[in-house]
Amino acid sequence: MKYCCTYHLNVFVSHSDQAFVLSGLYATLIYFGQKFMKSREKLDLRTPLTLWSLSLALFSVIGSLRTGWYLLNVLSTHGLRQAVCDTDFYSSPVSKFWACAFALSKAPELGDTFFIVLRKQRLIFLHWYHHITVLLYSWFSYRDRVAGGGFFMTVNFMVHALMYSYYTARAAGVRVPKPIAQIITVTQIMQMCVGLSVLMLVFRWRDEEHCKSTSENIFWGSVMYFSYLLLFCSFFYSSYISKPRVKRD
């Protein structure tokens, strides 16, 4: 299974336009899916959504444990610089399958959006923009085996473990306290801060022999993480802080 995953992803990323084609197909299906559902009743899909979210939650929990163990080991034995610059993450027996599976998972995760479309929920810009850009960045980063990947993947696994567990509970009809949603958004904001910080360190150490990256990866990664930071902060403000204006007579 491990070799199968690595082989198939290498086939995908050997042709970089595959990620763009998939993103274009995703955007097209969203557009026509919303038009298709416009005059139709929304679908409930509670059971499929619960199983979908649960599978992604379990995947993320296991992934965070495996990649987290590897990253923590490098941090404790070799320090921050080696942990940031490490590229053995992509080939180590402990983490190589999960590095590959992480990148591949960004394709099926696009399915989140279609539950929103079919249930006729509000689809915000942050949602589909995030799905497209993280797919592109993950596949190109995996192809180039860039420094910082261990941090990017591990933190994302951890946040998704929390996020999809929350989605599973909500889909199953469990009443989740509102502060949990706020905590998840805060962890997403923290994830963007970590991503930007790691890219800054990779940029600082990029000329060293063991800190492999590219100017394009650092630039586009910084643009991506900074845009996420702004969008998630805006989402947090509008969802949990901003008060609706009271209309006066």
Image (tube, rainbow, N blue to C red):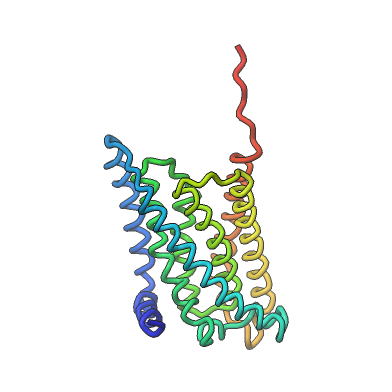
Residue at the spot 49% in from the left edge and 62% down from the top edge? 57
On the picture, is 164 further left or further right than 191?
left
Q: How many labels does the image show?
A: 0
| Residue 116 at x, y percent in the picture | 40, 47
Determine which quarter of the picture holds residue 177. top right
| Residue 117 at x, y percent in the picture | 36, 46
| Residue 89 at x, y percent in the picture | 55, 82
Q: Is residue 151 above or below residue 26?
A: below
Determine which quarter of the picture holds residue 212. bottom right
Front residue of 111 and 56: 56
Front residue of 79 and 76: 76
Viewport quadrant of the N terminus: bottom left
On the picture, is 162 further left or further right than 173?
right
Residue at the spot 66% in from the left edge and 78% down from the top edge? 72
| Residue 143 at x, y percent in the picture | 45, 78
Front residue of 125 and 56: 56
Q: In this view, does 154 lie above or below 207?
A: above
